[in-house]
Image: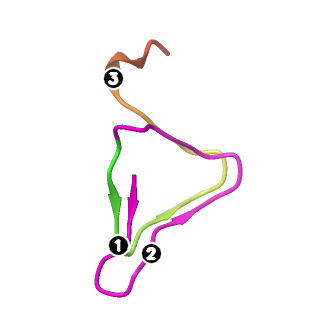
C-alpha cells in the first residue's frame, strides 16, 4: 500500500514491484525496476 503523509506521496519508478503487504509511507523514492517484497515470497 502507498500512503500519503504530511503532504508527501511515495514516488514509484517504472517496472517496480511493491508487495501487497508492504507499507510505503510519505517522502519515499523507489527507483525503476526495484522489488519491494518479503523474504518468504519464493524468489
Task: Give neighbour class at mark 2: few <14, some 14-19, many 20+ (Cα, 10 Å).
Answer: some
The numbered disc on residue 39 is: 3
Question: Given the current orientation, which residue lies at the most extreme top position?
Answer: 42
The numbered disc on residue 38 is: none
Residue stretch in magenta: 1-21
SS at circle 3: helix
Rendered image coloring scheme: rainbow
In the image, 34 versus 2, the foreground residue is 2
Q: Is residue 7 magenta?
A: yes
Q: Earlier in the sequence, mark 2 or mark 3?
A: 2
What secondary structure is the magenta-colored segment mainly?
A: loop
Spatial CA distance of label 1 from label 2 is: 5 Å
Viewer-side label of 2, 3: 2
Count of numbered circles on the image: 3
In the image, 20 versus 34, the foreground residue is 20
Residues tagged 1 and 2 counted as in contact (Cβ below 8 A): yes
Viewer-side label of 3, 1: 1
Residues tagged 3 and 1 counted as in contact (Cβ below 8 A): no
**Label 2 sits on residue:** 9
On screen, residue 29 above or below 35: below
Residue depicted at x 33% and y 23%: 39
Spatial CA distance of label 2 from label 3 is: 26 Å
**Label 1 sits on residue:** 26
Q: Quadrant of residue 4?
A: bottom left
Residue depicted at x 65% and y 45%: 33
On screen, residue 2 above or below 11: above
Q: Is residue 42 magenta?
A: no
Amino acid at each position: 500500500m502507498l500512503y500519503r503523509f504530511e503532504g508527501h506521496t511515495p514516488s514509484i519508478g517504472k517496472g517496480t514491484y511493491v508487495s501487497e503487504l508492504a507499507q510505503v509511507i510519505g517522502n519515499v523514492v523507489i527507483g525503476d525496476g526495484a522489488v519491494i517484497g518479503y523474504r518468504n515470497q519464493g524468489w
